[in-house]
Image: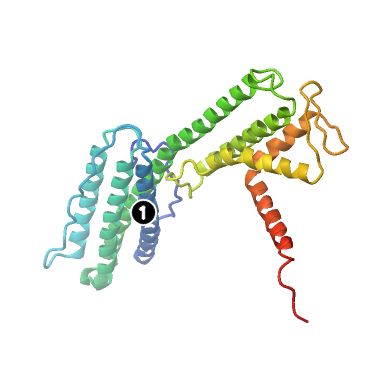
Amino acid sequence: MAQPGSSKPKVTQTPPVPSTSEDLEALAWKIRDEVGKEIPPLRSAAYAIAGYGGKPGASPALVSPPPMPGRNPGESLDDWSARLELWAIGLEQRLQASSSSQSPSVVAVLNATEAAGHLLGAVERILLSIPDDPAAKASEGVKGTIASRAFTIVATARDHADAADGLVKNLRNPIGDKELGFLVGWLTAAVFAYTAFHPAWGWLAKMPSESGAIWEVIFWSLFGSVADSYLRVAEDIGKETFDPRHPYMYIYRVVTAPLVALVVVFLWSVTGLALSSSSSSNLLSVGGLSPTLLVLIVVSFLLGFYSKRALQVLDQAWQRVSSSGNGGGTSKQS
């Protein structure tokens, strides 16, 4: 089944159809187990996307599947499996007719997984009935026909699960675009503020020259944190573990990176590495060295890009200072 909007459905390698009924039953069970494990994560992803609000376009209505036909008293398993096969075809037709929108939707994912679940139930009932069916025991041909129908139904369930997987991936794309657009907005605003208010040439040119170093630290660490967040979000969107309920999980780095960078620079000053910048010479003095301001820019960018690690280093340094202030802890008794 091809659901609308699943432009890149999951590609599943379907093994060749076995020639014996026993092998066909075993393959049907295998596919049934695989699809059964895939349905819950797909539905969880759909509900997560719905909670985030990522439902582009119109959504079709939830499909109420037709009731699965039960086995009538005295009915052979051959006849019942034939009716179940027709029921599966009707279920797929109803699902296709309900998909009026060409855009991916959460409801379409739920419909596909719901249909797959009902089909798996039908397959299980057929396969469990084969060993006790007199006609299947007496005739290998009848047993093969029944197993073939079960395989057809489970293959349809496999198609539904693949279509749902493709829909979920397509639904993630708008969420990822929104996250990346948010980061681009941050970067645009930061670049404007950096150039328009720069102490060396902008509207704040009358500020003390010492503020130049602080300015570079704040904004270049901000640029580094935005670059790190952009790369991580772009990578996470393509992962199976991507959680759309937490779209801004890396944004905190954009806010904390300048603070962390300033603390690191302050600690440098405390430890004797005096930092100073002059708008006239654009020089940075680190102790006895006098490299250009480019060094400060690169260091600030790296502090922002690796702000999480920098924060961990600060935490470890603080723990060491605290432990040394307490006398290094309790000493062992001799």
Across and down, in percent, residue 286 comes to 82, 37
Across and down, in percent, residue 204 comes to 65, 20
Q: Is residue 238 visible?
A: no
Look at label 1 and name its amino acid: Ile
Viewer-side residue, 268 vs 235: 268
Label 1 sits on a secondary structure element that is helix
Structure colour scheme: rainbow
Quarter of the image that includes the N terminus: top left
Task: Place residue 291 in its image quadrant.
Answer: top right
The residue shown at (22%, 70%) is 133
Task: Place residue 302 in its image quadrant.
Answer: top right
* Residue for badge 1: 39
Residue most extreme to the left: 73
Viewer-side residue, 259 vs 123: 259
User: Is residue 28 rendered to the left or right of residue 208?
Assistant: left
- Seen in the picture, residue 147 relative to 43 is either above or below; the reply is below
The residue shown at (38%, 42%) is 52
Quarter of the image that includes the C terminus: bottom right
Task: Place residue 7 in its image quadrant.
Answer: top left
Across and down, in percent, residue 23 comes to 39, 64
Residue most extreme to the right: 288
